[in-house]
Amino acid sequence: MSTLRNKVQLIGNLGNDPEIVNLESGKKLAKFSIATNETYKNTRGERVTDTQWHNVVAWGKTAEIIENYATKGKEVAIEGKLTSRSYETKQGEKRYITEIVCNELLLLSK
């Protein structure tokens, strides 16, 4: 059961081309967002689509696969863990972000 404690699985479409960062250490980082859609009927019987955006980061070999094959609009399935962190802007404001650290990726669209 310990593998289920912090596990995220999503299927969605890339919102933009991934941002690839080559770090001084030689590691590769891919940053991208995916959109997931949920469709339901409201109280008046109208069909409503709710889109949620998810920030995703990937490291190493997974980042290389994303760099080579994932582009805006592609449908992907990802698996990873949910993380939260904070950072400070150039103006000195503290910001908080929640993102998914992707450790597995499946390309679903051609």
Image (spheres, grey):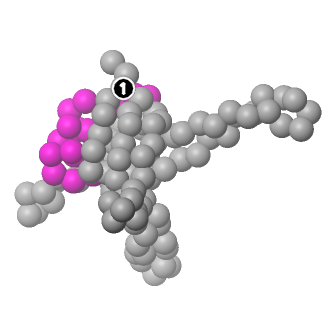
The amino acid sitting under disc 1 is Leu
Q: Can residue 32 be seen in this view?
A: no
Quadrant in the rendering for residue 61: top left
| Quarter placement of the N terminus | bottom left
In the displayed structure, 1 sits above or below 95; it is: above
Residue 29 point in image, percent of width and height: 23, 53
Q: Considering the numbered disc 1 on the image, is that residue within a helix, a strand or a loop? A: loop
* Extreme residue in the front direction: 1
Considering depth in this image, is 58 or 78 the residue closer to the camera? 78
Judged left or right of residue 5, residue 21 is left
In the displayed structure, 8 sits above or below 95; it is: above
Judged left or right of residue 39, residue 105 is left
Residue 5 point in image, percent of width and height: 40, 64
In the displayed structure, 31 sits above or below 99; it is: above
Q: Is residue 73 magenta?
A: yes
Q: Does the magenta stretch include residue 64?
A: yes
List the residue tagged with mark 1: 108
Judged left or right of residue 24, residue 45 is right
